[in-house]
């Protein structure tokens, strides 16, 4: 059995979505300066690094928040689909990709993963994302969880439509995965967000177990 940690490192240097607060991790009690223990303070967006989107992120109102997401969807068999040569994941790309039947958890490995492999900490607005028609295709295929290897499932300049299509259909969105060391194929996924009651998203630790 091999375990792959597909979570991003949370550091003050990590890229965040433009306009979101930067990550701040500060030691407020320090044994090296006479403190009786070490204690740190963390400030960050709930959509920084590896994280989950709740429906409330783009649907608002009384839509589900992060604690409402079904744990059974966040744990189970997943398929890593490698799409190294695409600039957008649209319906045609997905239809031609030969996704295995009955795939319910789909992780998309694209050229984005090369950014994490070379520790590129700049934000890249030209990242590969899922188009609205790609999102509709995933819903029609019965996918219940989709994971992507950059900070958003949707294109930089048109984020609402893809999110809304997926979240309205109850598809769980996992963003900010590092799939650089993972080969395409079947795995067991464990992806658990912090239980932030009433939140539109939450950081998560995600792992894949080879099967």
Image (cartoon, grey):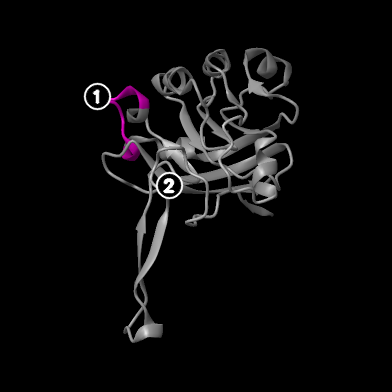
Q: Which residue lies furthest to the bottom in this view?
A: 34
Tag 1, which secondary structure? loop
Going from N to C along the chain, the mark reached first, 1 or 2, is: 1
Q: Give how far apart the Cα atoms at labels 1 and 2 are.
A: 22 Å
Q: Give the class, few, some or many, for how many residues have Cα within 10 Å of label 1's Cα (few <14, many ≥20).
A: few
Instruction: Name the mark on residue 38.
Output: none
Q: In which quarter of the image is residue 128?
A: top right
Q: Name the residue under label 2.
A: 203
Tag 2, which secondary structure? strand
Q: Quick one: quadrant of the C terminus?
A: top right
Q: Give the class, few, some or many, for how many residues have Cα within 10 Å of label 2's Cα (few <14, many ≥20).
A: many
**What secondary structure predominates along the stretch shown in magenta?**
loop
At 46% from the left edge and 23% from the top edge, which residue is drawn? 159
Q: Position of residue 4 (x, y in %)?
A: 64, 51
Q: Which of 205 and 133 is in front in this view?
A: 133
Q: Mark 1 points at which residue?
A: 61
Number of labels in the image equals: 2
Q: Position of residue 105 (x, y in %)?
A: 57, 31
What's the magenta region?
58-67
Q: Quadrant of residue 147?
A: top right
Residue 45 colored magenta?
no
Residue 64 colored magenta?
yes
Q: Image height check: is 34 above or below 175?
A: below
At 72% from the left edge and 21% from the top edge, which residue is drawn? 97
Q: Which of 32 and 186 is in front in this view?
A: 32
Q: Image height check: is 10 above or below 139?
A: below
Q: Quick one: quadrant of the N terminus?
A: bottom right
Q: Position of residue 38 (x, y in %)?
A: 37, 76
Q: Image height check: is 207 above or below 78?
A: below
Left or right position of 35 against 173: left
At 46% from the left edge and 31% from the top edge, which residue is drawn? 172
At 70% from the left edge and 35% from the top edge, which residue is drawn? 111
């Amino acid at each position: 059995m091999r375990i792959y940690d597909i979570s991003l490192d949370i550091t003050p240097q990590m890229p965040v979505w433009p306009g979101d607060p930067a990550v701040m991790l500060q030691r407020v009690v320090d044994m090296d300066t006479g403190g009786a223990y070490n204690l740190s303070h963390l400030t960050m967006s709930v959509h920084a690094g590896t994280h989950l989107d709740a429906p409330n992120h783009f649907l608002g109102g009384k839509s589900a928040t992060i604690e409402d997401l079904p744990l059974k969807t966040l744990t189970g068999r997943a398929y890593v689909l490698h799409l190294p040569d695409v600039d957008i994941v649209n319906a045609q790309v997905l239809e031609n990709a030969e996704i295995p039947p009955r795939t319910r958890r789909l992780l998309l490995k694209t050229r984005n993963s090369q950014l994490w492999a070379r520790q590129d900490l700049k934000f890249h607005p030209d990242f590969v994302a899922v188009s609205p028609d790609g999102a509709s295709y995933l819903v029609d295929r019965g996918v219940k969880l989709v994971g992507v290897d950059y900070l958003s499932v949707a294109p930089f300049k048109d984020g609402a439509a893809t999110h809304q299509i997926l979240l309205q259909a109850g598809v769980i969105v996992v963003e900010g995965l590092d799939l650089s060391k993972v080969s395409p194929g079947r795995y067991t996924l464990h992806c658990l967000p912090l239980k932030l009651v009433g939140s539109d998203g939450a950081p998560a630790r995600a792992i894949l177990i080879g099967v």
